[in-house]
Amino acid sequence: MKKTALITGITGQDGSYLAELLISKEYEVHAIVRRETLENSEKLKNIAHIENKITLHAGSLSDHLSIYKIFAKVLPDECYHLAGSTFVDYSFDEEFQTISSNFSSTHYLLSIIKELKPACRLFFAGTSEMFGEPVEFPQNEKTPFNPKSIYGISKVSSYYLIKNYREKENIFACTGIMYNHESPRRGNQFVTKKIVTAAVKIKKGLQKEIFLGNLDAKRDWGYAKDYVLMMWKILQQDKADDYIMATGKLHSVREFLDIAFSYLGLDYRDYFKIDQRFFRASEKLPLCGDTEKLISAIGFQHTKSLHEIVEEMIEAELKGYE
Ligand code: G4F
């Protein structure tokens, strides 16, 4: 029988790739989206090509009744909770909104699953920002959390909720602690997309320079399509558990910049300018995931190197000019 999945955050990079994956696996795919998103073709651009293969339900994740009614109608076998703010803001601006929407939506989903369909499996999108200023390197599933942003705090609190529903209520609920993962669908505010967009514009003579923060900052960058496959695999395991989702490899912003500009036959040193506004507090230990559990339990293999990810992003950006 066809499986049914419910996705939150379907219009984003991960949600849209996940929807494609589940369609290819013959799932019936449903998603909760804000009513105003349904009327905004720009916000729907990542799923425009699959719109006739999915069912979108207008609803608000901050409204229990709204989620309850959609869930009751869909009664999914699997639920992927990917929605939430994704840009890491180290100020505490919008703290109440961030905490309450990220935490409550997870809480609502868990309690609705318990009430309406306890057999439904739940994947929750965690983040390396739960480690914030990490206390060890690399980080594994036992590394103590040390979040330094409201975003990180909201994810840590949701993580404990997930863990408690799993242990006390026997719900198959898992947190994937995801490190940075990129693709042509990455949001413009993230450094990789910012670099790729600028490099292509510079190549085309539409922009002269790029302003960046700390070029020596390092990240564990993976490929977004790999991460959605991991999400699915995590929900197919015999036992629910939490996993670090990472590559275990570090690269600097400078390396990313160099790969992107070189691919276009440019030397980044001729075009970049440092802008203090984009600097963040210094990172004593970098965020880098220990992939041992992911590899031994899920048997996961990454499909693209950083070079290949950058190339795909540049090629997609160039296509936008055709
Ligand atoms: O691309 P970023 O803004 O991503 P960041 O903050 O690591 O967050 C992403 O990954 C997290 C998982 O690890 C997710 F939780 C989160 O939702 C999001 O997906 O910044 C990457 C690095 C940072 O070290 C930053 O300091 O790039 C450095 N950077 C240097 N110059 C810059 C810039 N980042 C941005 N956004 N813009 C710059 O000009």
Image (tube, helix red, strand yellow):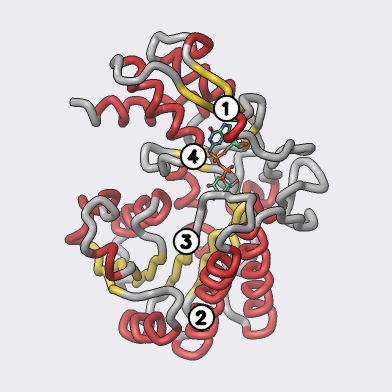
Which of the image's four quarters has the C terminus? top left
Helix or strand or loop: what does disc 3 sit on? loop
| Nearer to me, 226 or 195 | 195
Residue 185, quarter of picture: top left
Q: Is residue 299 above or below residue 85?
A: above
Mark 2 or mark 1: name the one nearer the start of the chain: 2
Give the CA separation, mark 4 to mark 1.
15 Å
Residue at image location 62% in from the left, 63% down from the top: 155
Mark 1 or mark 3: name the one nearer the start of the chain: 3
Pointer 1 residue Cβ closer than 8 Å to ligand 1: yes
| Nearer to me, 85 or 314 | 85
Residue beneath label 4, please?
190
Give the CA separation, mark 4 to mark 2.
29 Å
Callouts 2 and 1 close, C-beta under 8 Å: no
Q: Amino acid at mark 1?
A: Asp
Q: Image check: 155 left or right of 272?
A: right
Residue at image location 43% in from the left, 81% down from the top: 63
Q: Nearer the viewer, mark 4 or mark 1?
A: 1
Q: Amino acid at mark 2?
A: Tyr
